[in-house]
Image (cartoon, rainbow, N blue to C red):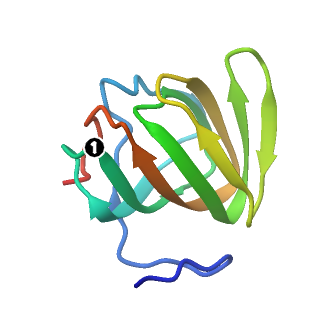
Amino acid sequence: MRKYKTGIEESSLEPWPFQGQESNYQILRGNPRASGRLDIGSNSGQHRMGIWRCTEGAFTCTETGDELQTIIRGHLILTRNDGESISCNPGDSIFTRKGERLTWDIQQEVTKVFFTYNCDGDAPGWD
């Protein structure tokens, strides 16, 4: 059993560089740095669950699986290619679809918990 709590700092996260070919990351602003930890699943599995943190900055990427995410710290604006945006704060949950191209604008360092399924297996550093 593991508890993820809003506002609590998570330790033991490893660097997760923005280099996945399937995700096709493009940095738009700043120098965002991501880190994370897998609590269930693996890079090659069909599902993953864990925690992800990213410093301020903005990037676009293509989602490699269907993912339910809950923000537990920070603030971000998530924008789809059609221009629809949502503002995400601690306690907010969002669902993204595999194949969606999204812009992640991290306004304040963000920590989220996630469950991803239907994965492509493109997550460097997640093994």
Q: Residue at x 67, y 47 (%)?
A: 94
Relative image position of residue 104 (x, y in whole percent): 63, 37
Residue nearer the viewer, 74 or 41 = 41
Q: Residue at position x 80%, y 39% from top?
A: 86
Residue at the top extreme?
82
Q: What residue is shown at x 18% (from left), y 43% (from top)? A: 44
Is residue 83 placed above or below 23 in the rendered structure?
above
Q: Residues within 10 Å of mark 1 (few under 14, many from 20)?
A: some
| Residue identified by numbered label 1 | 46
Label 1 amino acid?
Gln
Mark 1 lies on a secondary structure that is loop
Q: Is residue 35 left or right of residue 127?
A: right
Asked if residue 124 lies left or right of residue 15, the reply is: left
In the foreground, 65 or 125: 65
Quadrant in which the N terminus is drawn: bottom left
Q: Quadrant of the C terminus?
A: bottom left
Residue 42, horizontal then vertical, whole percent: 22, 53
